[in-house]
Image (spheres, grey):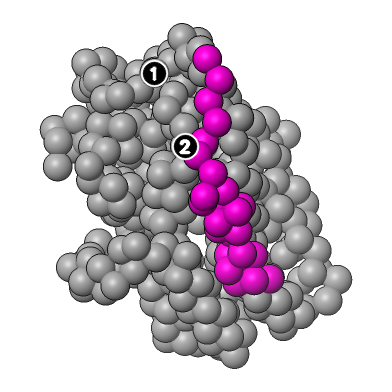
């Protein structure tokens, strides 16, 4: 693995560790500390994620125009300004504003990180994206484990820890990413060729539609399921431990996963479909869980599913992206994931407030079935064009 990719991996790990102090506890903080309903909490998280969607698309475009270094520093600077404010003012209105700005700033960072990873190690293929994905989950494991512990003393310490880690990330990016050269990257400002074939973009949008539904289900573990565990007397430390299990399993199971994924090396569609079925099983177990042990089992199953799905989608995006548009395609993928995180908590909160947790679980399983059907058809646009060369006009 190239040294430049190691720097990206370390930066991503520090970034996500800081964020993981806060994001698993957002709904709990809004509901328990600020006294807001699940529906209101869902709207707040939707605003955060909506800003992140905009940030993802802007960040991907900025990468294609100005490169990853400037794009990442801009995103970090915006996020840092909001985190400083979050540490000073703690009222509900301030929290909504700062959390939204954090979503926008961090949204700019992620597509550039993924696009740089794919560009600095193009021969690595899936391995480059899997490395960044593993780094994210080391951050999740460490941040979530420490977050529950720190929050048991005071939520104010959570904000301080988040800010501290982002300051470290800023210095890693400022000194470490300056000289990273992106192999084969061509700025769209200098790109005179117009790709007229839209089949690859259509294929990516199919994948992203399925990806969106998966994220809408997955994010319930951070929102409605998080609050539900509190209502059935599962402690905050135990809930945070679920995310530690998630991150630790992703890291420790990599040797086994690498062997298993070799079977899907040339069939990412099948890999995603199997992961989606595993998601369905996980939520089936969660729907009958009433003790920590059962939620832990559901989380283990969920983690196996995400290990198959999450790295596969940016890998597909990188393989489909025309030269000079890698950032834009990764921006679409990241904004899709963020869109799921935006819509999911709101829909989940409304379903639980109006109906029940059981109705939510049944709805999510239906979402996964639809996701399966969409994934099975994602490569149809490519098959239609397989016999026709890509038309490029000078």
Q: Position of residue 227 (x, y in %)?
A: 62, 67
The range drawn in magenta is 370-394
Is 18 one of the magenta-colored residues? Answer: no
Identity of the residue drawn at 76% across and 71% down: 352
Q: Nearer the viewer, residue 381 or 265?
A: 381
Q: Quadrant of residue 267?
A: bottom left
Q: Position of residue 14 (x, y in %)?
A: 30, 39
- Neighbor class of circle 1 (other Cα within 10 Å; few <14, some 14-19, many 20+) is some
Q: Position of residue 306 (x, y in %)?
A: 43, 65
Q: Which mark is residue 321?
A: 2
Is 381 one of the magenta-colored residues? Answer: yes
- Mark 1, residue position: 186
Relative to 286, say whether 78 is above or below. Answer: above
Identity of the residue drawn at 43% across and 15% down: 187
* SS state under label 1: loop
- The mark tally for this picture is 2
Would you say 178 lies left or right of 332 here?
A: left
CA distance separating discs 2 and 1: 12 Å
């Amino acid at each position: 693995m190239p040294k430049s990719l190691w720097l990206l991996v370390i930066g991503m790990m520090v970034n996500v560790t800081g964020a993981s102090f806060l994001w698993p506890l957002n709904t709990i903080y809004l509901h328990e500390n600020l006294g807001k309903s699940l529906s209101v909490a869902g709207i707040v998280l939707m605003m955060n994620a909506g800003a992140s969607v905009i940030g993802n698309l802007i960040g991907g475009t900025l990468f294609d125009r100005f490169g990853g270094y400037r794009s990442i520093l801009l995103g970090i600077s915006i996020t840092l300004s909001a985190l400083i404010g979050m540490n000073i003012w703690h009222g509900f209105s301030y929290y909504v504003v700062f959390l939204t700005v954090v979503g926008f700033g961090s949204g700019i960072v992620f597509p550039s990180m993924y696009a740089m990873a794919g560009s600095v190690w193009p021969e690595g293929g899936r391995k480059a994206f899997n490395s960044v994905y593993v780094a994210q989950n080391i951050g999740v494991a460490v941040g979530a484990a420490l977050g529950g512990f720190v929050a048991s003393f005071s939520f104010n310490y959570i904000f301080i820890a988040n800010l501290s880690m982002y300051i470290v990330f800023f210095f890693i990016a400022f000194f470490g990413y300056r000289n990273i050269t992106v192999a084969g990257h061509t700025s769209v400002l200098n790109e005179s060729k117009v790709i007229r074939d839209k089949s690859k973009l259509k294929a990516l949008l199919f994948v992203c539609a399925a990806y969106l539904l998966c994220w809408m289900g997955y994010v319930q573990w951070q929102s409605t399921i998080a609050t539900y565990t509190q209502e059935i007397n599962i402690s905050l430390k135990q809930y945070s431990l679920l995310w530690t299990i998630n991150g630790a399993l992703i890291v420790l199971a990599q040797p086994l996963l690498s062997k298993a994924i070799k079977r899907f090396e040339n069939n990412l569609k099948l890999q995603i479909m199997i992961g989606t079925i595993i998601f369905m099983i996980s939520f089936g177990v969660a729907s009958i869980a009433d003790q920590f042990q059962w939620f832990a089992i559901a989380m283990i199953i969920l983690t196996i599913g995400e290990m198959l799905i999450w790295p596969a989608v940016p890998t597909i995006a990188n393989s489909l992206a025309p030269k000079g548009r890698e950032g834009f395609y990764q921006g679409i993928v990241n904004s899709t994931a963020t869109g799921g995180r935006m819509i999911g908590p709101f829909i989940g909160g409304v379903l639980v407030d109006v109906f029940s947790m059981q109705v939510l679980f049944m709805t999510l399983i239906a979402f996964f079935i639809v996701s399966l059907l969409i994934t099975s058809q994602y490569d149809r646009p490519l098959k239609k064009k397989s016999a026709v060369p890509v038309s490029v006009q000078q």
